[in-house]
Image (spheres, helix red, strand yellow):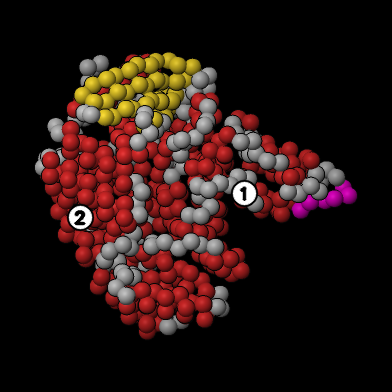
């Protein structure tokens, strides 16, 4: 049983940060008090209050479990239960400390989502955008470690104190603010807070024309580094905020595009695409807007909303235009690497673009996430795990990157670790479809069919391209043939109704059913339609029953993977 639940990932994270861990004896009254105390110490909020090592924890747990001879508790049972309860807190803390080791001496700051004064939901994109652009500006400064968006935004609209947020995000400083945006004017109030003491180190207020937004951001960023006494290599007059466009209206439209792109669902991606296109119409030289437009196209394909061939030309054209306008943007090279990898299967270009992105900004989590997928495509699974783990260290509360780490462990056939990581993901969001997919298929490969089937039955399905075939695969592998056929027929009916269904998903189910001929037919179609998951073919255990067939190796070579 997880220690905290809630209606959303943010609610659960807030409870992890703020609420005391409930004693185990509230659900197991017969548990020895010593075991309860040991577990509570292992789950302490502050890392310094926990056990110094896993060995120390084991020693304490063995001692506490055997303290009362008349009721001996099995240590293995306690450990298994504790893995579910404490994995998220422990893993996040370890990940964050790992990041601090890489940047020894760096001061850590989190830019919290700025409040939208007036409360009009239509203006929320602007206050969110102000926060994100300040994160980007401060992240460019050597000597500062800036919490990425996902982790910082997990505290949006939460009644948390500065010390609580500082401990949860492992930062010394918080940049808070509020924005009023109306009638072509902006008013920004902001303050820098020492998190541990909730003491204000600096504050200011700005009221300007909306066209001065970049100047305001630059002034705020300089005030932060002056207060923290961070030395700038370019001198005190160095511009920290890059003016991305000369058009106030284009910038406003771009922020709305970013706001909807962050939601990632089909309708939101279409709205984001519209806003980016309108921003470009106002400023044809807006490189970031072209990169955003490219991402809308390419992500719609990878998420399974549209067929790859229907979207590729627009994605590539927008990315190349962004590159021509500004080749120094990490976002542009990440977009190009994404297209080369997922839509073109051009491994050499993907490597070059991701290497360039990481060189431009080694603290940009998406570059590491997609670079990890490049290593899957080129059959370097341990490198894939390491690269995505870097992304998790940079943004430890991002459920997407955490989910993909479970994927990498799964493809690397490290199933016990994949299971543990999937449990961590579900601590972040208990209803996250892709997290449950990873949990279910790890159970399946560990021959824990009952748990695998229970997991997929609890899933609230959403479009997720090839991942949609996992339920049918599990039913087939676990002897529920009729249920597997029902999944298959459901997809075939959707395809007849005109909905895009990846042939890779169908191939996964046919492979589980042992129908090799149909599986290869669907894989051939998946190759023709350029389904991105074809580059996972060599790694995916779903197709282990096909590997001895010469047709399998021919497919792998057609995709261009190493023999």
Sequence-wise first label, 2 or 1? 1
Considering the image in quadrants, where does the C terminus appear? Answer: bottom left
Q: For the stretch drawn in magenta, what is the main secondary structure?
A: loop
Q: In the figure, residue 526 lies in which quadrant?
A: bottom left
Q: Give percent across and percent down for residue 249.
A: 18, 36
Taking the magenta stretch, the answer to whether it contains residue 73 is yes
Q: Assess whether mark 1 and mark 2 are in contact (beta carbons under 8 angstroms).
A: no
Relative to 467, say whether 255 is above or below: above
Give the residue number, with chain letter if any, for mark 1: 2
Which type of secondary structure does the marked residue at label 2 adopt? helix
Front in this rendered view, residue 467 or 119: 119
Residue at the image position 20 percent from the left and 60 percent from the top: 312
- How many C-alpha atoms fall within 10 Å of the one at disc 1: few (<14), some, or many (≥20)? some
Taking the magenta stretch, the answer to whether it contains residue 160 is no
Front in this rendered view, residue 139 or 22: 22
Which label is found at residue 381?
A: none
Residue at the image position 87 percent from the left and 47 percent from the top: 69
- Cα distance, mark 2 to mark 1? 41 Å
Q: Is residue 8 visible?
A: yes
Which type of secondary structure does the marked residue at label 1 adopt? loop
Q: Which residues are magenta?
A: 69-74
Which label is found at residue 315?
A: 2
Front in this rendered view, residue 531 or 79: 531
Residue at the image position 47 percent from the left and 28 percent from the top: 171
Residue at the image position 24 percent from the left and 26 percent from the top: 185
Q: Is residue 534 left or right of residue 85?
A: left
């Amino acid at each position: 049983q997880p220690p905290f639940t809630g209606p959303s990932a943010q609610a659960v994270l807030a409870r992890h940060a703020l609420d005391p861990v409930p004693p185990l004896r509230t659900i197991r009254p017969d548990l020895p008090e010593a075991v309860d105390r040991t577990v509570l110490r292992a789950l302490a909020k502050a890392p310094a209050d926990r056990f110094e090592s896993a060995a120390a924890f084991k020693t304490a747990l063995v001692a506490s479990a055997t303290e009362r001879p008349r009721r001996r508790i099995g240590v293995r049972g306690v450990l298994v239960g504790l893995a579910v309860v404490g994995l998220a807190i422990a893993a996040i803390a370890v990940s964050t400390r790992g990041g601090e080791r890489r940047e020894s001496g760096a001061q850590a700051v989190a830019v919290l989502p700025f409040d939208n004064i007036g409360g009009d939901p239509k203006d929320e994109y602007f206050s969110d955008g102000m926060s994100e652009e300040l994160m980007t500006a401060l992240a460019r400064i050597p000597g500062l470690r800036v919490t990425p968006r996902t982790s910082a935004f997990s505290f949006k609209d939460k009644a948390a104190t500065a010390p609580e947020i500082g401990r949860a995000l492992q930062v010394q400083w918080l940049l808070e603010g509020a924005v009023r945006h109306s009638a072509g004017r902006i008013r920004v109030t902001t303050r820098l807070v020492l998190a541990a003491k909730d003491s204000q180190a600096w504050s200011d207020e700005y009221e300007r024309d909306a066209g001065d937004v970049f100047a305001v951001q630059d002034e705020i960023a300089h005030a932060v580094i002056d207060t923290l006494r961070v030395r700038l290599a370019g001198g005190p007059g160095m511009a920290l905020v890059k003016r991305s466009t000369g058009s106030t209206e284009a910038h406003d439209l771009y922020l709305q595009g970013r706001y909807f792109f962050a939601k990632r669902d089909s309708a939101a991606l279409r709205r984001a695409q519209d806003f980016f296109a309108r921003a470009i119409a106002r400023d044809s030289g807006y490189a970031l807007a072209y990169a955003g437009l490219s991402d809308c196209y390419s992500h719609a394909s990878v998420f399974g909303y549209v067929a790859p061939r229907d979207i590729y030309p627009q994605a590539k054209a927008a990315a190349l235009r962004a590159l021509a306008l500004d080749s120094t943007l990490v976002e542009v090279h990440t977009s190009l690497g994404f297209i080369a990898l997922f839509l073109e299967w051009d491994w050499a270009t993907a490597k070059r673009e991701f290497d360039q992105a990481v060189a431009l900004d080694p603290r940009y989590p998406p570059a590491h996430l997609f670079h990890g997928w490049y290593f899957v495509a080129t059959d370097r699974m341990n490198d894939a795990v390491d690269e995505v783990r870097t992304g998790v260290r940079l943004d430890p509360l991002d459920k997407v990157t955490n989910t993909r780490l479970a994927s990498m462990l799964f493809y690397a056939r490290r199933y016990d670790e994949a299971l543990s990581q999937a449990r961590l993901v579900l601590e972040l969001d208990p209803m996250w479809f892709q997290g449950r997919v990873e949990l279910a298929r790890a159970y399946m490969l560990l021959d824990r069919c009952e748990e695998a089937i229970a997991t997929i039955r609890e899933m609230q399905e959403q479009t997720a391209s090839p991942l949609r075939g996992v339920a049918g695969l599990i039913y087939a592998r676990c002897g529920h043939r009729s249920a597997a056929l029902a999944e298959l027929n459901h997809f075939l009916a959707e395809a007849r109704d005109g909905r895009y269904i990846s042939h890779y998903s169908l191939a996964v189910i046919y492979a589980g059913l042992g129908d090799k001929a149909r599986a290869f037919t669907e894989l051939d179609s998946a190759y023709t339609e350029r389904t991105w998951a074809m580059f996972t073919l060599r790694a995916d255990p779903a197709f282990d029953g096909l590997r001895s067939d010469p047709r399998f190796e021919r497919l792998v070579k057609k995709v261009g993977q190493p023999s």
